[in-house]
């Protein structure tokens, strides 16, 4: 039986997706991404996979079993985590797509996604640390002042310092406008121009730890007299240790973790309750304009949503690898009067192929999205708009896939999957958070049907579906799904009320995501031609012939409207 620590990087399929779906060769023709030639891309993908397998994967199981702990106000990780993170920083993996002006390598976002895919497949909980740092880099690069960028970005880009995102409060989850954390201007003395921060934030991923020299908290707070709701929120940079003008570390700031959440999974990721200003001495700096904090934070969150969609690919890959290893070695029953491994039984074969097809479909969608982001960076406005449409699809469907594939992995193991010793249950427990954080999948679907559906007067979604339909002329099921998506999109834009759209948002989001993933898998198969391996042919055909027709069955729910949901009152419904 394969150990739950075993991990083999999916290098061949990653390179295929990067080449075909992201279109890396086209990106390399630009001056900005000229370094991303084929040899370098292959070296990054192979190197990231080898690093993840050697440094992060062996810590996955011990991280789940021992978890992070809080002792005397200090967050501690299991043995080996500090050394692995130090190696990650020393080898430059955090800086792959970082701004070159601040020590980054300036490579495409696509390759940063690949680094995170490998790290997260090896150890999902650990990889949340660099994910949050990458988001902080994005926020400061777009909204920070020149002085803030010069002081904080070099160490964030290298990974020597890490970043966090502080939104949620006990009374303010998805309704961020209800937050109560305050920021009071300091008007005199040596700290004039800064702000005194007071409040409590919950669910702060990697909110405190000892792996990085400093932690840069990006905190949403409200200034005195600010407008109510989300219009009155500002963003503040609050370091764990104050930073001197020369970049050296000063004294500890008045911010601390007061407890760690006890979670279903991702146990090695310290999810902190953070207290700011217990002693009235927590100081921060304004990032961007007053009352514009939510816009700045969404720069960070949009990046995080892509990387959380990536987590669906990661956990799917890890669960699939383990399920195949178990199925090949587990002998049960007989085929043609001889003992047989369970991989030879039809339903187990169905589950394994489904796991493989869904994971590869989500990966194709991931790298297609990343490629559109990179084109947007190069100034392609249509690609940037398409990326905006794709982000909720990737985050929502990608993470749903992660949960489904991890659940199938438990099922393939049978009773052995339900006990902790095999490690299959860890993948399922770890996967379950991804559809929840960075905006629940229902919020992603709502974003799709309320905001993204109207982009460019509806043209952004229409153009995407048209491209799918054009490519699917010889694929009847995919062409039919694209037609269904087109009809639903038109109904939602032209006839449905807001409640009707929201009531059908999740099935429509799934349908559109499956259609894009099927299209991208079809592109892979056509690019490979006669050289396509048997396994790739089988997984793509499974997706196109089984997953795509299933998605068409969601059309009725997408257009059923809201009225049936409200036919009984809430009290009647709860009986």
Image (tube, grey):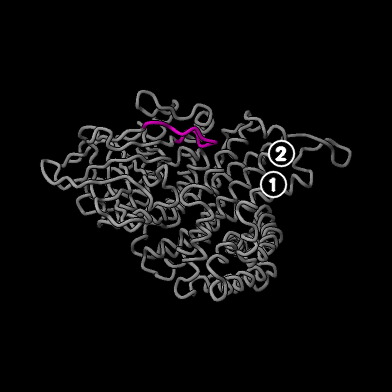
Q: Give how far apart the Cα atoms at labels 2 and 1 are.
A: 9 Å
* Residue drawn at x 47%, y 36% as measured from the top left: 56
Q: Is residue 113 magenta?
A: no
Please report contact status of discs 2 and 1: CB closer than 8 Å, yes or no: yes
Decide: few, some or many residues near mark 2? Use Cα within 10 Å; few <14, some 14-19, many ≥20: many
Q: In this view, does 494 lie to the left or right of 543?
A: left
| Residue 274 location (% of width, % of height) | 36, 37
Q: Position of residue 272 (x, y in %)?
A: 41, 36
- Nearer to us in this view, 271 or 107: 271
Screen quadrant of the N terminus: top right
Q: Which of 435 and 212 is in front in this view?
A: 435
User: The magenta stretch spans which residues?
Assistant: 258-269
CA neighbours of label 1 inside 10 A, class few (<14), some (14 to 19), many (20+): many
Which residue does the image show at 52% across and 39% down from the upper left?
122
Query: Viewer-proximal residue, 231 or 61?
Result: 231
Q: Earlier in the sequence, mark 2 or mark 1?
A: 2
Q: How many numbered tags mark residues here?
A: 2
- SS of the residue under disc 1: helix
In screen coordinates, is 135 left or right of 242? right
Q: Name the residue under label 1.
A: 352
The residue lying furthest to the right in this view is 337
Q: Is residue 153 left or right of residue 306?
A: left
Local SS, label 2: helix
Residue 262 picture location, percent across and down: 49, 32
Q: Which residue is identified by label 2?
A: 327
The quarter of the picture where residue 74 lies is top left
Q: Is residue 262 above or below residue 522?
A: above
């Amino acid at each position: 039986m394969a150990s739950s620590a075993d991990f083999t990087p999916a290098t061949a399929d990653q390179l295929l997706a990067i080449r075909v779906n992201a279109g890396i060769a086209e990106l390399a023709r630009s001056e900005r991404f000229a370094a991303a030639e084929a040899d370098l891309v292959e070296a990054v993908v192979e190197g990231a996979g080898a690093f993840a397998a050697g440094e992060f994967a062996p810590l996955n199981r011990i991280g789940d079993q021992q978890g992070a702990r809080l002792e005397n106000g200090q967050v501690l990780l299991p043995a080996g985590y500090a050394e692995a993170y130090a190696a990650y920083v020393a080898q430059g993996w955090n800086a792959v797509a970082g701004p070159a002006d601040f020590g980054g390598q300036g490579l495409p976002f696509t390759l940063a996604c690949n680094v995170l895919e490998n790290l997260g497949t090896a150890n999902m909980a650990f990889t949340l640390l660099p994910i949050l740092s990458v988001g902080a880099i994005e926020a400061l690069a777009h909204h920070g002042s020149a002085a803030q960028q010069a002081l904080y970005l070099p160490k964030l880009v290298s990974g020597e310092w890490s970043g966090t995102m502080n939104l949620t409060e006990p009374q303010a989850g998805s309704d961020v406008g209800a937050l109560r954390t305050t920021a009071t201007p300091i008007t005199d003395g040596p700290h004039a121009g800064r702000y005194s921060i007071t409040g409590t934030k919950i669910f702060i991923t990697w909110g405190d730890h000892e792996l990085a020299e400093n932690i840069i908290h990006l905190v949403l707070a409200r200034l005195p007299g600010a407008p109510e709701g989300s219009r009155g929120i500002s963003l503040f940079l609050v370091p764990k240790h104050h930073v001197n003008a020369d970049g050296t570390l000063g004294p500890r700031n008045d911010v601390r973790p007061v407890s760690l959440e006890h979670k279903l999974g991702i146990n090695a990721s310290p999810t902190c309750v953070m207290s700011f200003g217990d002693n009235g001495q927590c100081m921060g700096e304004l990032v961007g304009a007053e009352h514009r904090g939510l816009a700045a934070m969404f720069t960070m969150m949009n990046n995080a949503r892509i990387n959380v969609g990536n987590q669906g690919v990661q956990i799917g890959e890890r669960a699939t690898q383990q399920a195949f290893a178990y199925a090949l070695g587990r002998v049960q029953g007989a085929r043609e009067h001889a003992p047989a491994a369970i991989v030879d039984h039809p339903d187990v074969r169905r589950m394994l192929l489904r796991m493989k097809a869904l994971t590869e479909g989500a990966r194709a969608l991931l790298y297609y999205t990343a490629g559109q982001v990179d084109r947007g960076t190069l100034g392609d406005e249509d690609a940037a708009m398409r990326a905006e449409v794709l982000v909720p699809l990737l985050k929502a469907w990608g993470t749903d896939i992660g949960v489904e594939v991890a659940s199938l992995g438990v099922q393939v193991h049978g009773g052995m999957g339900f006990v902790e010793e095999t490690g299959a249950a860890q993948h399922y427990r770890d996967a379950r958070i991804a559809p929840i954080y960075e905006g629940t999948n229902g919020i992603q679907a709502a974003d799709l049907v309320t905001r993204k559906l109207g982009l460019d007067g509806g043209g952004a979604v229409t153009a995407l579906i048209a491209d799918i339909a054009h490519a699917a002329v010889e694929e009847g099921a995919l062409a039919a799904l694209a037609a269904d998506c087109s009809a639903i999109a038109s109904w939602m834009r032209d006839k449905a009320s807001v409640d009707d759209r929201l009531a059908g948002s999740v099935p429509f989001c799934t349908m559109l995501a499956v259609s894009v993933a099927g299209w991208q898998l079809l592109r892979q198969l056509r690019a490979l031609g006669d050289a396509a391996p048997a396994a790739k042919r089988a997984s793509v055909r499974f997706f196109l012939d089984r997953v795509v027709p299933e998605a068409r069955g969601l059309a009725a729910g997408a257009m059923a409207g809201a009225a049936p949901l409200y036919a009984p009152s809430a009290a009647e419904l709860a009986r």
